[in-house]
Image (tube, rainbow, N blue to C red):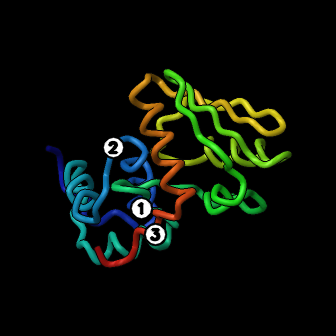
Amino acid sequence: MGKTLSNVDKGTRQDLIIRLISERSLGTQGDVVAALSDVGVEVAQATVSRDLAELGVLKVGNRYLALPHEPGSAGIEVLPSFVLDITPAQNTVVILTRDGTAGAVANVLDRVKGLKIVGTIAGQDTVFAVSPDNDAAEEVASLIADVCRARTRPAGNVE
């Protein structure tokens, strides 16, 4: 390991949390504490809980996803209202949306950290989300379905 970075500032620690969530499948606050420890940052679980809440990280199914806040942009909360059907097709996920909302759905999916999507293409009512492989596409379809079934919650809650 390297030197301990326990004195990192809050912004650096939160940036690390977003990076770790996007690189690893983390599903508990303890997982995040351990991942931070792996990179030399020692922090209490209570601190991680506050960080996750401040960052707007969501627990979707059994893992965390983060959507960086961009003023004026739709958030992940629009998916249940806009998405009508989700179909994995090999390494692509075909997402049918309400008319005129595909662009907003694609924009949200492109911005979610930790979602295994290489990129999206949006039409009027259809989004093609390309994943690196078939298994990743199945996982993406499942996570989007979980969001649409409201199986999400803020990650800062007690687990």
Q: Is residue 149 left or right of residue 10?
A: right
Q: Is residue 94 left or right of residue 138?
A: right
Question: What is the number of callouts on the image?
Answer: 3
Badge 3 vs badge 2, beta-carbon distance below 8 Å:
no
Secondary structure under tag 2 reads loop
- Establish if 121 lies above or below 103: above
Residue, disc 2: 24
Residue depicted at 32% across the width and 74% down the height? 47
* Percent position of residue 12, x then y: 42, 59
Q: Which callout, 3 or 2, points at the residue further toward the start of the chain?
A: 2
- Establish if 29 lies above or below 148: below
> What amino acid type is highlighted by mark number 2?
Arg
> What amino acid type is highlighted by mark number 3?
Arg
> What amino acid type is highlighted by mark number 1?
Lys
| Mark pair 3, 2: CA separation | 19 Å
Secondary structure under tag 3 reads strand
Crowding near pointer 1: few (<14 within 10 Å), some, many (20+)? many
Badge 1 vs badge 3, beta-carbon distance below 8 Å:
yes
* Percent position of residue 123, x then y: 80, 33
Q: Is residue 99 left or right of residue 2?
A: right
* Percent position of residue 83, x then y: 67, 50
Image quadrant containing the N terminus = top left
- Establish if 19 lies above or below 95: below
Residue depicted at 34% across the width and 63% down the height? 8
Residue, disc 1: 59
* Percent position of residue 141, x then y: 50, 40
Q: Which callout, 2 or 1, points at the residue further toward the start of the chain?
A: 2
Badge 2 vs badge 1, beta-carbon distance below 8 Å:
no
Q: Which callout, 1 or 3, points at the residue further toward the start of the chain?
A: 1
